[in-house]
Image: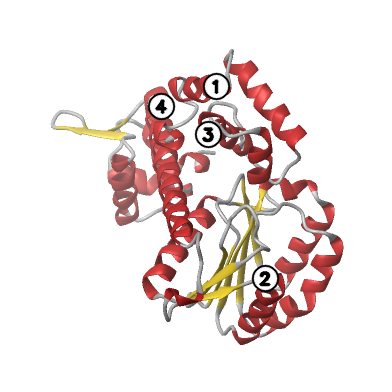
Amino acid sequence: MLASLGLDTLTEEVYLTMLSHPSQGVAEIAGLLNRTEEDVRAELDRLHELSLVRSSAQDGLRAIAPELGMEALLAQQQADLAAQQQRVEASRAAAAQLIAQFADARPAWGPHVEHLENLEQIREKLVVLTRRVRHEVMTFAPNGAHTPESLESAKPLDAELLGRGVRMRTVYLDSVRNSPHTVAYAEWLAERGGSVRTVPSLPVRMVIVDRETAVIPVRAEDARQAAVVLTGQGTLTALCALFESAWSSAVELGAVQKRDESGLSPQEREVLVFLYQGMTDDAIAKRLGVSPRTARRVANDMMERLGARSRFQAGALAVQHGWLPAVAAV
């Protein structure tokens, strides 16, 4: 019942038992739950960390009333959400800075950077890298739904890699949930051991092979124009951290997306950030992998809910109302 608030089954049982038997000690609770006293003491430590029990010289350990305890848990979840959002935004900023450094890509960058001039070279390099992969492929796919033909053409190589035990993780945009053939492809991958998750937006298209080589576009707005192949250890460490940050906040493609405590979907929250940053409908649509019409509709809905007269004001009001952590709008 309280798993969504961070309590596992035994922790919840101990807490509820303390509420219903407030005068019982550790030994009595252990007997009621058919657990060892060591188990109960471990759960009491956990409950104390969660501020769901208190101790005093007069009363010993006592459970906090549910109306107070649940408020504390919800407040902690909100703090954790804000911290996670801050980590994601910091990673995006780092990625944007890294990409900006490579905006004028040239072959003379050094031994850890290879410049790919066109789409044909990019495709050839990706084929070579994926053929040589030994352990893992991590991918950001920010271009929305793929065509059925492109997904079918990817299956033979994907099947080969998964058959060799290669770990494959791909992060798509939330918008692909409306694409039946993309969902079917994700299910096909999952049946063979691959993993697909989604997020509202992604900073750049990226493929990382064995945590040793990364391919990213020179310009995020046109991934097919030119790309760079990066092999420097420091650069790969930063890009892998960016992927792991996005992966940890992403949602399994087959899972039901939940609205937050403000009633916002992940996509609506992202739109509010983009409004605060002054993005146009076309720019928002590209980041979300949706049509400009859909982006405009979501933006207008958010402005109406907030009573905002401008896009920037909508983002500012969202921060004031606690719908967004202040750092998310930076």
Find residue 273 and report its horizontal and vertical position in percent: 53, 34
Q: Nearer the viewer, residue 23 or 242?
A: 242
Furthest toward the right, the residue is: 149
Please give the name of the residue rendered at 86% of the width and 66% of the height, measured from the top-left corner: 149
Return the residue at label 2. 118
Amino acid tagged 2: Asn
Q: Nearer the viewer, residue 274 or 174?
A: 274
Please say if the residues under marks 3 and 2 sit with CB atoms less than 8 Å apart: no
Please give the name of the residue rendered at 66% of the width and 63% of the height, measured from the top-left corner: 225
Q: Nearer the viewer, residue 138 or 114?
A: 114
Identify the mark nearer the N-term, 4 or 2.
4
Which numbered dot is residue 273? 3
Residue 61 visible in the displayed image: no
Amino acid tagged 3: Val
Q: Nearer the viewer, mark 4 or mark 1?
A: 1
Which numbered dot is residue 314? 1
